[in-house]
Image (cartoon, rainbow, N blue to C red):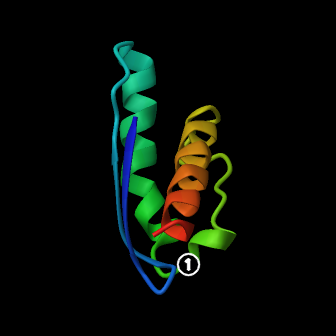
Amino acid sequence: MTVDVSLERNIITEVEVTPHATNETSLELQQRFAEAVPAVVIGKDIGEVEVGRLAGSSGTPDGFNDAIRQIREQAKNE
């Protein structure tokens, strides 16, 4: 999945998750996760964001949290 985040003073103002799964079940779980995640992370400090099981998806949060860690590191260096 691809994760795009907009930040303002380290606060998440927008988030877009684009699923890339090829398996039908995985794709459905990623799509449900993508729809649910904005309500959980928008308005939060990126340094404090880490999601768990969301919208029935237990594996997708791992990829999302890894992406958030990478974005956090990239934001520090800019």
Relative depth, front residue between 35 and 21: 21
Q: Secondary structure beneath disc 1?
A: loop
Residue for point 45% across, 22% down: 26
Residue sitting farthest toward the front: 77
20 over 61 or under it: above or below: above
Relative depth, front residue between 12 and 23: 12
Relative depth, front residue between 8 and 29: 8
x and y percentages locating residue 56 in the rendered image: 57, 40
x and y percentages locating residue 63 in the rendered image: 56, 37
Residue for point 55% across, 36% down: 60
Residue sitting farthest toward the bottom: 9
x and y percentages locating residue 65 in the rendered image: 61, 48
Residue sitting farthest toward the top: 23
53 over 22 or under it: above or below: below
18 over 13 or under it: above or below: above
The image quarter containing residue 14 is: bottom left
Quarter of the rendering occupied by the N terminus: top left
Quarter of the rendering occupied by the C terminus: bottom left
Q: Is residue 75 left or right of residue 50?
A: left
x and y percentages locating residue 30 in the rendered image: 42, 35
The image quarter containing residue 15 is: bottom left
The image quarter containing residue 21 is: top left
Q: Is residue 77 left or right of residue 59?
A: left
Label 1 belongs to which residue?
Answer: 44
Residue for point 47% across, 87% down: 9
Type of the residue with mark 1: Lys
Residue for point 47% across, 58% down: 37
